[in-house]
Amino acid sequence: MQKVLRKISPHTIGIFTDCEITIDSLNKVNNNIYFIEEIRNRIRILQRTNSALDPSWVKAHVGIYGNELSDQLANAAACNRDTTVSFNRIPKRTLYSEIEEGTQKWKK
């Protein structure tokens, strides 16, 4: 396994995700998906404070503690009906995916 060493300053914020699409989307200027724009806006705010963002991809479901914990917390939050909804816009892709999945289950 090859290790990549990066020079990290005290103002560098490491973000680890198991979603390569998110990292790729952040780098594509023409990607205007709401969530990506929100992330970009927050990155701009951080850059004004001389902070840098270091996004890194990690492999999913291979026992990486922080990644497994974040998945568990996200699932718990999604299932908690007492959670205040802070975002109520569902991307069209998600709706299409949910409809397709439901249709496939219904056909069986």
Image (tube, helix red, strand yellow):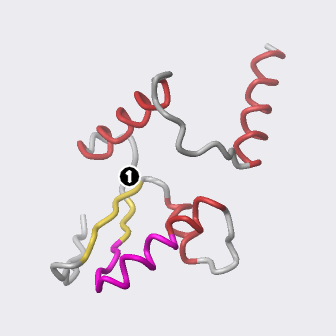
The residue sitting at 39% across, 62% down in the picture is 57
Task: Indicate the quadrant containing the C terminus: top left, top right, bottom left or bottom right.
Answer: top right
Q: Quadrant of residue 49?
A: bottom left
Residue 84 in the image: state x and y as whole percent: 49, 34
Query: Foreground: 16 or 34?
Result: 34
| For residue 98, above or below residue 91 | above
The amino acid beneath tag 1 is Lys
Residue 15 in the image: state x and y as whole percent: 34, 63
| For residue 68, above or below residue 42 | above
The residue sitting at 64% across, 61% down in the picture is 34
Picture mark count: 1
Residue 10 in the image: state x and y as whole percent: 15, 79
Check residue 78 for magenta coloring: no
Query: Foreground: 63 or 10?
Result: 10
The residue sitting at 25% across, 70% down in the picture is 2
Q: Which is the main secondary structure of the residues drawn in magenta? A: helix
Residue 8 in the image: state x and y as whole percent: 19, 80
Q: Is residue 107 left or right of residue 58?
A: right
Q: Is residue 48 left or right of residue 79?
A: left
The residue sitting at 82% across, 24% down in the picture is 103
| For residue 75, above or below residue 19 | above
Crowding at dot 1, Cα within 10 Å, few <14 / some 14-19 / many 20+, comes out as few
Q: Is residue 100 left or right of residue 72?
A: right
Check residue 53 for magenta coloring: yes
Q: Quadrant of residue 45?
A: bottom left
Q: Secondary structure at mark 1?
A: loop
Task: Indicate the quadrant containing the N terminus: top left, top right, bottom left or bottom right.
Answer: bottom left
Range of magenta residues: 40-54
In this figure, which residue is indicated by the disc labeled 1?
Answer: 59
